Amino acid sequence: MNKQERNKAIKEIKRLWNKVEYVLNNRSMQNYGTQLLRMNRKESQDHDTWRTGQDRGLTITEESKFFAVKRIMEYTYCLENPPSLDYFHSTLTSVYQAYSLANEFQTKIREVITEEEAKYLNALDYCELIEVSE
């Protein structure tokens, strides 16, 4: 992925996340979008403890938004199988949170994000996004 493609992808991730976050934060007294983003941020920071001395092509915030919106789209549009409770203790908690939110707010999410946009996100490769390009 070249720099121009990465910048386009990051811009699209942010745009789509803003739409989803607005939907999730305005459904009840809970700010579900903010909660999901915080979960993803914590998981990204924890993952970084294993990446010592390596540069990153995404900021922690960009990476958090990527995983949050990607997972919501995967489950909203059935692009991935739902997570199994058999693996709850060995899977990131945010995966289950995203599945739950996608299930509960599917209709509202589908009003703001198209299936084509969801497929675009699903096709993005995290390894290519995080890679540092010159």
Image: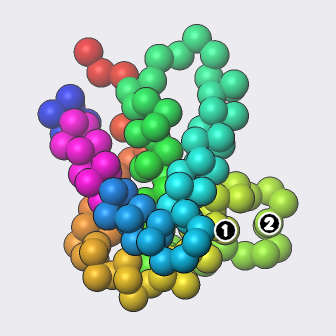
Judged left or right of residue 123, residue 52 is right
Give the main secondary structure, helix, strand or loop, of the magenta stretch. helix
Name the colour scheme: rainbow
Residue at the disc numbered 1: 96
Q: Looking at the image, which is closer to me, 91 or 113?
A: 113
Query: Residue at the spot x=79%, y=66% of the render?
Result: 88
Query: Residue at the spot x=31%, y=51% of the render?
Result: 13
Magenta-colored span: 6-16
CB under 8 Å between discs 2 and 1: yes
- Secondary structure of the residue carrying tag 1 is helix
- Three-letter amino acid code at disc 2? Phe
- Marks 2/1: CA–CA distance: 8 Å
Residue 15 in the image: above or below residue 2: below
Question: Which circle's residue, 2 or 1, is located before the other in the chain?
Answer: 2
Rendering coords of residue 93 (x, y %): 71, 59
Q: Between tags 2 and 1, which lies in front?
A: 1
Q: Quadrant of residue 92?
A: bottom right
Q: Which mark is residue 44?
A: none
Judged left or right of residue 1, residue 51 is right
Residue at the disc numbered 2: 88
Q: How many marks?
A: 2
Q: Is residue 122 visible?
A: no
Rendering coords of residue 117 (x, y %): 25, 67
Q: Looking at the image, which is closer to me, 25 or 3?
A: 25
Judge the density around disc 2: few (<14), some (14-19), many (≥20) Cα neighbours within 10 Å: few
Say whether residue 12 is magenta: yes
Query: Residue at the spot x=36%, y=22% of the render?
Result: 132
